[in-house]
Image (tube, rainbow, N blue to C red):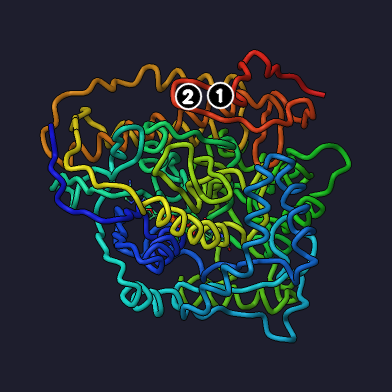
Amino acid sequence: MKLKKRIETDILVIGSGIAGVCAAVSAAREGRSVLLTSSANTFSGSTFYPGTWGFGLVGPDGEEDTEELLETIRTVGSGMINEKVARAFAEGLNSSVDELEALGVELMKPSGDASGEKEYIPCFDHKHRRWRGLTKKNLLRSLPSILEESGVKELPFFQMTEIVMNDGRASGAVGVLNRKDTLYIAAKAVVLASGGLGGLYRRRLTTDDVDATGTAAAMRAGAEAVNLEFMQIMLGFVRPAFKTIYNEKTFFASRFTDREGNPFIGRYLPFGLKEQEVLDARSLHGPFSSETVSRYLDIAFSKEMAKGNTDGMVLRYDLERLNSGSEFVKEYFRWLKDEKGVSAEEEIILAPFMHASNGGIEIDENAKTSVPGLFACGECTGGMHGADRIGGLSTANGIVFGMKAGRSAAGYAEDKELVEEAELEAFNIADSKEKLEALRETMYRDAFIARSSESIEKVRDFIGRMELAKGRGTSDSDYLDSNRLLSSVEMARACIEAMDLRKESRGSHYREDHPYKDESLGKMIRVRLKKVRLKKGEPIAAFTGGTK
Ligand SMILES: Cc1cc2nc3c(=O)[nH]c(=O)nc-3n(C[C@H](O)[C@H](O)[C@H](O)COP(=O)(O)OP(=O)(O)OC[C@H]3O[C@@H](n4cnc5c(N)ncnc54)[C@H](O)[C@@H]3O)c2cc1C
């Protein structure tokens, strides 16, 4: 079916989390007309997740710290970074965050007394740096007027389903508005800021609009993804206050048991390793990592839940220990009580949740993808973070590359023409919602914390048996759900191919059948739809597995 353009804009931004908003404002300040779209309301996605107080943002503490930060990104990422992109990131961090502040977004700073607390050292980092806090309240207070003053137009509740390609370049997008109206938006350049891949998993600490549709559409348009096997998995509340983030700074006072009250972590520890040592190591980072003894905690959760405790495990705080905690920890419990009505005295059921993606669509240092006219920023991208990432750098990534993407897209649009028509083939896959839930369940069970050839094969087999025949579109909302299912299947496949190729454990990627790092496999894995390979020109066969 041919769709005539109904809306036109110089720059189309897909996604209105921190990355999309920064891209939109930057492009508009370059004098371009900008349309900021999102599948939920404007200001949505992980950036506005209700289960947390806000975000910590770190940056180099003075110019001399830039190289040190870059070296730490490299080390924490276990070498799996794109050097140019990571450098552009580290060098652009403070100025981009300052620019956001100058636009009118109020940032928190640690008070003089608290700035030395170790809690201000983010996950996986080893020293104090420049720390800023970005709260949802402050963002929502300032962003509406910043968008208005910049002349950015908004189109909420538009779910992009395909990036429109013309003569080999991105020239807009098609999608569905308000679940009932297919629409072609013609644009001279497109910025993808659609967030991570949380939607591939049954349990996710993200909002429901953060699904795989944006990344999959970019891959269908020809973009390449990198580091998809690296994702952040962390503990969250199952009950009470479902999907509230568990604060890793409280591991030191956490006591975990099964539903019968029996401690279970000890069952999974190697001889001589004490549970408190694991908890202390685990308190240094929120997301799971295979790199230190802290991994035994998440592995214990994963094993116990696989044994039938699918609901989650029990947490009770040791109140005496908790009271000796820092001001940062006390602030967290005040927030937990005020916002979520949960007190430290209560029994809490916890489970691991998919939280954020470290990998995604590969960009260069100017936020360009390999598809002409398509730029990308924020959590949908990959290359600046590696196998693990320092806390506070994900939001920062959205700010730095959001601004870069906006400027690059504005420059690219200079001499481009709008394209009048786009092709849309709406389709319908029967029971797509139920099938998506089944896929999420399978990914949660078999492609989550502990991966192996066998578990990956189970996902592959599950996908192979899915009934995905495309029928004719019956309604726009059926098409929307079917597109989400197909996109999720494609991205699940892309992720498991990357997980399978990495036959070692590195950072957030843990292989039960290859539990150690293998330096000979220290290469970034890039995935294209249908084709899976390491680097351009390097055949898969060159990537042989093995453990040390
Ligand atoms: C609980 C929690 C705590 C966190 N803590 C920290 C922290 O302390 N420090 C830190 O740096 N990071 C943290 N993160 C990660 C960080 O919040 C995210 O990585 C970041 O906000 C992502 O921003 P983004 O703009 O790339 O994507 P998002 O904020 O996820 O926005 C995605 C946008 O894309 C839209 N979208 C998606 N698909 C489509 C489509 N097909 N069509 C149209 N629109 C679409 C969505 O509606 C949404 O508007 C945390 C995340 C969570 C969930």
- Drawn side of residue 250 relative to residue 228, left or right: right
Type of residue at label 1?
Answer: Ser
Instruction: Work out whether 39 lies above or below 25.
Output: above
Tell whether circle 2 marks a residue whose Cβ is less than 8 angstroms from ligand 1: no
Give how far across and how far down residue 139 sits, in percent: 44, 74
User: Which quadrant holds residue 230?
Assistant: top right
Q: Is residue 231 or residue 236 the one in the foreground? A: 231
Residue that protrudes farthest toward the top in the picture: 541
Decide: marks 1, 2 in contact (CB < 8 A)? yes
Residue 279 place in picture, x, y as percent: 75, 54
Q: Which residue is mark 1?
A: 455
Front position in the image: 398 or 430: 398
Whether residue 8 can be seen here: yes
Q: Is residue 174 above or below residue 113?
A: above
Q: Residue at x 75, y 72 (%)?
A: 62
- Which residue is the extreme one toward the bottom? 112
Q: Is 458 drawn above or below residue 165 in the view shown?
A: above
Tell me where residue 450 appears, x and y as whole percent: 62, 33
Tag 2 residue: 459
Nearer to the camera, 320 or 232: 232
| Residue depicted at 42% across the width and 33% down the height | 219
